[in-house]
Image (tube, grey):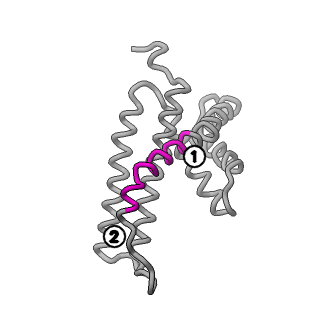
Amino acid sequence: MSGPDMGRTTARMLRVSTLALCLEAGVALAGVMTVGLSMPPEPGEDTGGGGLFLVLLPFLAVASVLAAFAASAALVLPVVLLGENLGRRFGGRPAWWQLSLAALAGALLAPVAGAWGWLVGGAVLAVAALLTRPARRGYFVRLLLWGTVAVVTAFLAGGVILQLGLIEA
């Protein structure tokens, strides 16, 4: 089955790139929580506030999706289009490394701090661009399912790492 309905559209690319950024944030959250929970609290540090976090969680989720949507429109889609343009100019079909170069160039536009921030921003953009490029009909659901598996696996791995004591404070 082919036709205009099966092809990649800007709306599909925007949905997929927003999802990709949210999934990347989920994996990053698993890593940050694993490291954060491995550290003992400072003397006199208040470890409460879990109830407030649960109340604010829906608002944080909406704000995160809106931020991912804005980053998709401003950074990820231009990176995909630039990478594909580079691919057509220098070899016919876009390759993963051309999208990665475009992502590193796109990371220069993002307000990040230092060389590590630039590299992390470039990596985040590159992964989102690579996941966005094949955004055809039905791809969103597959990415949602496999991405959810990846996020849950990251949280489970973090829990196993904490239980086994593999991270020292």
Magenta residues span 52-69
| Residue 159 sits in quarter | bottom left
154 w.r.t. 7: above or below: below
Q: Nearer the viewer, residue 55 or 125?
A: 55
Residue 3 forms part of the magenta stretch: no
76 w.r.t. 158: above or below: above
What is the secondary structure assignment of the residue under circle 1? helix
- Mark 2 burial class by Cα count in 10 Å: few <14, some 14-19, many 20+: some
Write down the residue under mark 1.
126
Nearest to N terminus: mark 2 or mark 1:
1
- Counting from the top left corner in percent of width and height, residue 10 is at 56, 26
Q: What type is the residue that disc 1 sits on? A: Ala
Q: CA distance from mark 2 to mark 1?
A: 28 Å
- Counting from the top left corner in percent of width and height, residue 55 is at 38, 56
Q: Nearer the viewer, residue 70 or 157?
A: 70
Residue at screen point 42% across, 53% down? 26
